[in-house]
Amino acid sequence: MKCRIHSLLGILILLLALPSAQQFSMGTKKGKYTYYGVIPSRLYLLRPYRTTHGAYDISKGWHIDKNWNTNEGYVAIIGAEEKTHVEVYTMPGWKLIKRLTLEPLKKSLITLPNGTIFKVLSDKPVGVMAFSKNSNSNMSSGIYPVLPFTYYPSIGGGYSGKRFVLMASQELDGEPHMIFALEPSEVTLTREDGKKQVFKLEANGFKRLALKPFMAYKIESTGNIMVFSGWVTPRTYFIPAAEGGFLGRRFYTPSRTSWSYTDYGFRIMALEDAKVKIWNLEFRKLIMEVRVKGGEMATVKPKADVIVVESDKPITFEFAHSGDITPLFSYGCGVTYIGVRKDEVIPVYMPLNSTVELYIFASKDAIVKIDDMQFRVKADGYFKQTMRGVHRITADNDIIVEMIHWPLIPKEQGIQHFGVAVPPIESVSATSHVELSPIIQGHGSMLAYLEVGVIMLTSIAAGFLYMKRKVK
């Protein structure tokens, strides 16, 4: 009798334990959030030799830059919610390589060989970032921070929202992280060690931030915001629309106050004729108006630190370097994502003077069309395609497209470094409930005017002191 009781108790304990085991095991049952990505196969930089005067001369041949030559990349996973169960898989066959549980602002760093196709599954939203390293690092961690050129997905889905988590990766100086306020917002920035920063932004305001490398951050806001890291340098990145998705009418991004003759710039693509206005966001000044014909692309180089772009018709907006190495030695590459919603048609520019790889991921069976070329992507699978130029992408289910490109010349060229936030495919159809405020000419940020005033007063004071010394 006692034996039977003990046996029954044992079975009962086993049954009680099963639900938690099933909840953690996502290998057989797909998790709620799915992040697909690729570590580029070529993580190195070929530079041309220099002349005796120090100028680059591509006719003299090429050599590998010892600072940028690595055979591995990294995937960082940052927790946003309590007891988040995560599994990491790699191709071929989606082999399980890691299983972990994360708490808020706890992170895990996974090393993967070049060319690895990976998948991160989680039962709650997480932050995922793929990046590379400097191979000649003096950092105590052994990894030199590489700045991602990317917009960060929100915890709620899409690229505009009120909650974000990320791992910072930047050099020790500069303010390459930006927060754009789509609505009046009080923003709280919390670092993994508990340090906090709180600030307010008006609608259409922005703030630059310097974050500590390899620290996890939580960003919470009372209004909808967008989060970006990077500079406007020869690194290609897709720009999500403020109202959700990548096909939209308003876009926020940093820009440049001066441009070279290099074939790079902001690319505007429209399915139908569109009138586009480009504003200097800092001073609310209209600096450019462009008409884009349907089915064509316009390239613009607006001179401003930060811009906002408005269109009367849906457009896609992208910063891209073509890969052209002239004049002298120019170098451009990119690793970036774009989401394509079910039955949506997205025009995309794929750099002309580059080798371009497209990795198209689907969580459900999808029929994908690029212009007139049609193919099937199986559920939880991917399709690789190489092409250049402006093309239209559409699918009968949500898909995620990762674009990787590097210059055609020399043919052995690689990608110097990369960093990109990986979005979950479940967020592709996320809609943003944002109340966008109009851009009003001359209604610039008070902080911007104060900064200009300080500069003017400093100049006047310096001039006065100079004149005073001259009189003496």
Image: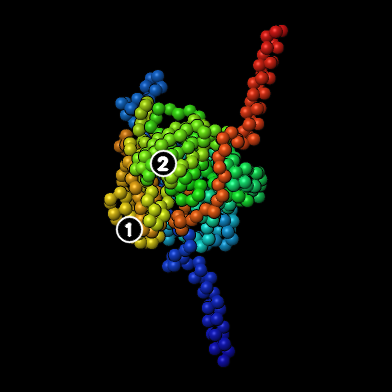
Q: How is the image coloured?
A: rainbow
> Where's residue 208, x and y in %?
58, 39
**110 above or below 332?**
below
Q: Quadrant of residue 8?
A: bottom right
Q: Which mark is residue 243?
A: none
> Where's residue 444, x and y in %?
60, 35
Confirm whether residue 309 shows in the render: yes
Q: Residue furthest bottom?
A: 1
Task: Indicate the quadrant containing the C terminus: top left, top right, bottom left or bottom right.
Answer: top right
Q: How many neighbours does mark 2 have within 10 angstroms: few (below 14), some (14-19), or many (20 or more)?
A: many
Mark 2 secondary-structure assignment:
strand
Q: Nearer the viewer, mark 2 or mark 1?
A: 2
For the point 42% across and 58% down, the residue is 89
In the image, 433 versus 6, the foreground residue is 433
For the image, the number of numbered tags is 2
Task: Indicate the quadrant containing the N terminus: top left, top right, bottom left or bottom right.
Answer: bottom right
**Which amino acid, by three-letter code, is at mark 2?**
Ala
**Which amino acid, by three-letter code, is at mark 1?**
Ile
Q: Residue furthest top?
A: 472
Sequence-earlier tag: 2 or 1: 2
> Where's residue 377, x and y in %?
33, 58
In the image, 204 versus 147, the foreground residue is 204
Confirm whether residue 74 shows in the render: no
For the point 51% across and 47% down, the residue is 242
**424 above or below 313?**
below
Q: Which mark is residue 367?
A: 1
Q: Is residue 150 left or right of residue 93?
A: right
Query: What residue is pinned by disc 2?
Result: 274
Mark 1 secondary-structure assignment:
strand
For the point 68% across and 19% down, the residue is 461
In the image, 183 versus 415, the foreground residue is 183
